[in-house]
Amino acid sequence: MTANDQTQLGNTLWKIADDLRGAMNADDFRDYMLSFLFLRYLSDNYEAAAKKELGKDYPVLNGNGGKTPLSVWYEQNPDDIIEFEKQMRRKVHYVIEPKHLWNSIAYLAKTQSNELLQTLQEGFKYIETQSFESTFQGLFSEINLDSDKLGKNYEERNKKLCTIIQKIAEGINQFSTDIDILGDAYEYLIGQFAAGSGKKAGEFYTPQRISDILSAIVTLDSQNPSKGEKKKIERVLDFACGSGSLLLNVRKRMIEAGGTIGKIYGQEKNITTYNLARMNMLLHGVKDTEFEIHHGDTLLNDWDILNEMNPAKKLEFDAVVANPPFSYRWEPTEAMGEDFRFKSYGLAPKSAADFAFLLHGFHFLSKEGTMAIILPHGVLFRGGSEERIRTKLLKDGNIDTVIGLPANLFFSTGIPVCILVLKKCKKFDDVLFINAVDHYEKGKRQNILLPEHIDKIVDTYRERREETRYSRRVTMNEIEKNEFNLNISRYVSTSLDEEIIDLEEVNKKLVDLDKEINKARETHNQFLKELGLPPI
């Protein structure tokens, strides 16, 4: 499928969503739409695996009348079903009964069957409970098919679902059945729903262009970025992963660069978004053994695998990326001051957990790793405990680069943000400042970073290049003289230098101008005299 076809599929599905959701909130409709797309993916993947498993015994149907090849095989081989499903759990780690496959569900929708809603509920529950891996447990827990938002009673809800699923099925059937394209369509829809849900979108979505910057930075050689991309990233972490798009961006970049990536780790506090992230991983072809997404609170560090106290077993990451909630209010306890993540630095203030998030990710960064985190500008210059944390990170040589981005790039806020790049061991003893605040294209609702803006930032980081009014390498001595204030405009001003005025030259011009005025007046008065009029 071409990129154009992928875009068309995304547009087609978004139009369906826009037409069908009616008065329903975009966030609510998002969960239904994306879950049905995900069921389509799981079904296609399952049927392909079943065909391979059954080989020549897999039925071939001409005009199915609502039946799938697998439903025919189940009817013909009732004694072999248990063993077959056991094999499928081993191979694809989940089981879907024939009546719950997408094509069966789509047929019920097309025929306006009154059994659709009940069959869907049973199908979602079966996938969750009969799967081999915990990846699938609770995956559809937030999809409430009994919600009044779908209709006042069973009949209304069933009718609405029939319409939604029929339209999705028709929309997808216009395109190739290649399952790889669904991942891109899913990502496109996440972006579109984020744009439509305004401030709430900040909870789960990092704009693609900003993801591109972070993923480009963490995949470059950490000691000397000018060497190019790393050959391998063993583990990557996003501790505020939202829908998982940032993690997927890192994976995609590594694969496109010919490198390899080991396991993907993400953490997300919001249960709905946590489910969204797991679906997103699977839809992009990431096997359930290749990722681990944890539902929990990063600030409390309630993920067991990150609480290993034995240094030899401590989990470390070659790449850490994050777009945590900006200036999030939290409640640090006295005991948290002894937490291994914060003990050497002190606690971030209650009013803004920005540095608490940063220190969490930084603690788990490997010695050869790179961390890139999006934060509000306040972390660069605010005083108090934040100043103490910032000062220690600078004195320890852990802050590598500070990148200032334009305002109004996010759906959730119009404030300008920065990217901090951190390393535990870095080659350069200065700090690179990139001031990209004026490099963007103005959009209707949000400002937009174009590919050339992203390339300029990444190239400047990679080559550690200095450019007037854009980037500069600043020594620690200068930063110390500024009391460890990292306000970007202190080091890289985007304003043009004021022209130096030569007062002597200006005075000479004024004198000459005065002479010309007097000469013109004399000539004018001569004409008036000849006309018998008084002079002026």
Image (spheres, rainbow, N blue to C red):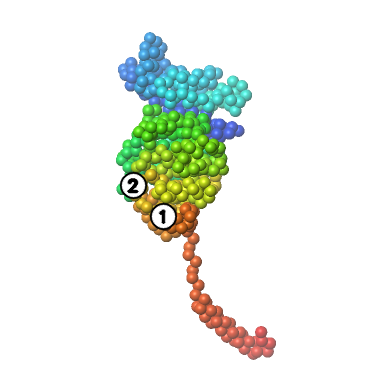
Q: Where is residue 35 shown, x and y percent of the image?
A: 49, 28
Question: What's the mark number on residue 319?
Answer: none
Q: Is residue 514 left or right of residue 176?
A: right
Whether 27 is drawn above or below 520: the answer is above
Secondary structure under the numbered disc 1 in the rendered image: helix
Residue 383 seen from this side? yes
**What is the quadrant of residue 320 in the picture?**
top left
Q: Is residue 154 left or right of residue 293?
A: right
Secondary structure type for disc 2 = loop
| Vertical relation: 79 (above or below) 279 | above
* Quadrant housing residue 180: top left
Q: Position of residue 328 (x, y in %)?
A: 54, 41
Residue at (40% x, 21% y) in the render: 132
Q: Amino acid at mark 1?
A: Met
- Splitting the image into 4 quarters, where does residue 210 fall? top left
Expressed as whole percent of the image width and height from the top left, the position of residue 300 reads 50, 34
Q: Give me the C-alpha separation between circle 2 and circle 1.
A: 18 Å
Q: Nearer the viewer, residue 337 or 47?
A: 337
Residue 175 shown left or right of residue 407 in the figure: left
Residue for badge 1: 476
Q: Amino acid at mark 2?
A: Gln
Work out which quarter of the rendered image holds the N terminus and state it. Answer: top left
Q: Which mark is residue 223?
A: 2
**51 lies left or right of 524:** left
What's the residue at 38%, 20% (across, down)?
89
- Tell me which numbered mark, 2 or 1, is placed earlier along the sequence: 2
Dot 1, crowdedness within 10 Å: few (<14), some or many (≥20)? some
